[in-house]
Amino acid sequence: MTHSRFACLYLALVLSAAAADAPAPVQTTPKLEILNKQIAENADNYQAYSNRAYVMALLGRKDEARADLKKALALHDKPQMHNRAGWAYFNMGDYADSVREFELAAKLSDHQAHYDYYSLVLGYWGTGDTQKALENYQLAADKDPRFGSYKTLQERTLEWTPLEQRAMHEIYVLWSKAWKP
């Protein structure tokens, strides 16, 4: 009995020490401060709300990101805003919401926006729908040849988040090995 108490105490100490060493979540950034100021100066600045939502999503501040996305969409219910919302939802891990927004953006733009297909790749990757991700990857490569080779895909996605890059690169590998015509 005493041995198990010491084991539990040791485990608790190790976990609390690990938690103490963990970096604190980032609460603000210079970009976030600029976006806050833009919104304070113009409460109808849908672009600032959208940008702030994306930053909040990257910082892990999901509730605030969702609130800003709703505000941005209420102010500017256009295809590009739904696409931007999809990217924020994707980075929060809300894959079903990202697919909903990406599909709506593509529908509203009649699949004419340059980002429609590769955005859908991300959403479908997130939901585990590999078939749809591959179909849309082919369409993305047809529309933008940079998606057709690994080197140009890397260049195209250089400034994407690690999660965005991972999703696109994983689908590219499957596409290049089993799908590419």
Image (tube, rainbow, N blue to C red):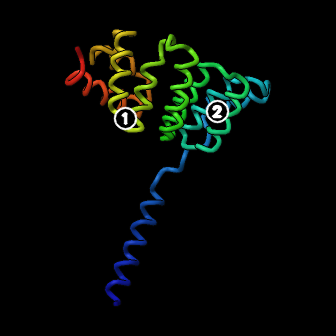
Which residue does the image show at 37% across and 35% down from the upper left? 129
Which residue does the image show at 26% across and 23% down from the upper left? 175
Could you tell me the amino acid type at mark 1?
Asp
Q: Which mark is in front, 1 or 2? A: 1
Quadrant placement of the C terminus: top left
Q: Which mark is residue 139?
A: none
Q: Looking at this view, name the residue that lies furthest to the left.
A: 177
Residue 17 vs 9, above or below: the answer is: above
Q: Looking at this view, name the residue that lies furthest to the bottom.
A: 1
Residue 169 vs 24, above or below: the answer is: above
Tell me residue 28's x, y (percent): 62, 39
Which residue is the site of mark 2? Answer: 69
Question: Number of labelled discs?
Answer: 2
The image quarter in which residue 32 lies: top right
Query: Image check: 75 left or right of 52?
Result: right
CA separation, marks 1 and 2?
25 Å
Tell me residue 72's x, y (percent): 68, 28
Element assignment for label 2: helix
Q: Closer to the camera, 178 or 19?
A: 178
Which residue is the site of mark 1? Answer: 129
Which residue does the image show at 46% across and 66% down from the upper left? 16
Q: Residues within 10 Å of mark 1 (few under 14, many from 20)?
A: few
Q: Residues within 10 Å of mark 2 (few under 14, many from 20)?
A: many
Q: Closer to the camera, 65 or 58?
A: 65
Query: Image check: 91 left or right of 82?
Result: left
Tell me residue 128's x, y (percent): 37, 38
Which residue does the image show at 34% across and 90% down from the upper left? 1
The image quarter in which residue 85 lies: top right
Residue 179 vs 163, above or below: the answer is: above
Element assignment for label 1: loop
